[in-house]
Amino acid sequence: MLNKRLLIKRLLTYNDENSFYDKKRQLNLHSKEGKGKFLKHICALTNANPNNNSYIVVGVEDEDNKLSGVDFFDDSKIQNLVNAYLHNPPQILYENIPFPKLQKNKVIGLVTIIHKDQPEITSFRKKIHKYYSGFTYKRVGSNSTLMIANFDLKDTNSDIVATIEKSAKNNIKHTLDGVFDFMNRHQNNNPNYKVFKEQFVLCWSGVKKTINDETYYSRVDIEMVTEQVKLFYSSLDEVDIHYNDNSFIITEYISLGINNNLNRYPLEKKVLHFADNGNYKIISEFIFNPPQFDKKTLFHLYNSNNALVEKIIKKQSLNIIEKSDVLKLPSTYLILSLNNFTDAKEKLNSIKSFLKNHTEDIYQEYKEVLRVMRKVQYH
């Protein structure tokens, strides 16, 4: 079982990117340009490593390998993106890896490109941004190079990748250190742990509250300590947690409403199944049924939100009521987006810098709202 934190440390000893490993300050999967660049690197690394895994480490400064971190990323549809645009797509795994010295709520992203049993050249199947159908790339040193003609897939990295992965194997000390570290970091948020199948150590924490005899948690953090992988993070939403000897079940809820008339709606269920053979899998089920509101009320909300955003963009002074309404902008734009106001996300993004510099809570809510919008869009 690989300790992913150790794996990242081993990869970063190779200060320059190479044909089996790349590093990025961040990924931009919200634009066609960003998606295209990401797919180019996936294509190139896959073709350079037909017989072993390749890796992209996200949240690292290029010059000095400093770990700057990125936000928790739970985009379970990243594989769909790869399948949609690439011929002979590899299997992709994106994981969030916590490091003790990172800023609060930051992780290092680890993209694993899993080698294919029957390697064939990977290429673009359709155009995205400036990358056209039929384009294929291969990693040459630290560059993802456009290949003009057909080429042979050659194994040049299996030995070194196997050595790196072997050196990142987990042990009892790493596991115990991880459990104690988690417990200390979350000592005020009801930390717990459970061992599944005598192999997997799962830690979780959250602010507990009871509503109608049901227990929910907010500010939830869940980590698979044996792999040093953060499996779930939510700064605001409410989560219901259940488990048995074989599974750990997370049901995520969001609260939505107008004029403080809030209701709780189930968003997504994730089930971790643990097997006796040392493997586990995560099954996600999107269970959200977006609430619909009165159109007249929504248009009033839309117009008042837009007027407030316009004042913020023009840096005009806000009165007391408007300052209070600013705190509601992320949640109300989410409601508008769920009710077919197609530019709601664009309006909200236009004041990102303002929200970022306002308070940490409202900026966290802004990021949570974008996460929900992305999930709804995919489904």
Image (tube, rainbow, N blue to C red):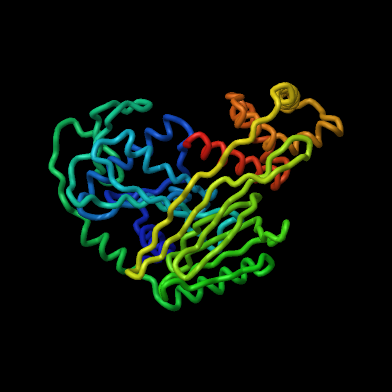
Front-lying residue, 121 or 332:
332
Residue ID at (61%, 44%)? 368
Q: Please provide percent x and percent y for residue 222.
A: 54, 61
Front-lying residue, 65 or 187:
187
Q: Please provide percent x and percent y for residue 242.
A: 56, 63
Q: Is residue 49 above or below residue 277?
A: above
Q: Is residue 282 above or below residue 83?
A: below
Q: Is residue 372 above or below residue 125?
A: below
Residue ID at (35%, 52%)? 112
Front-lying residue, 164 or 190:
190
Q: Please provide percent x and percent y for residue 140.
A: 24, 43
| Extreme residue toward the right, this view | 320
| Extreme residue toward the front, this view | 212
Q: Is residue 254 above or below residue 124?
A: below
Residue 101 quadrant: bottom right
Residue ID at (20%, 53%)? 51
Q: Along the horizontal axis of the image, is 272 left or right of 323?
A: left
Q: Along the horizontal axis of the image, is 70 left or right of 125?
A: right
Residue ID at (38%, 51%)? 93
Image quarter in which the N terminus is found: bottom left
Q: Please provide percent x and percent y for residue 73.
A: 50, 48
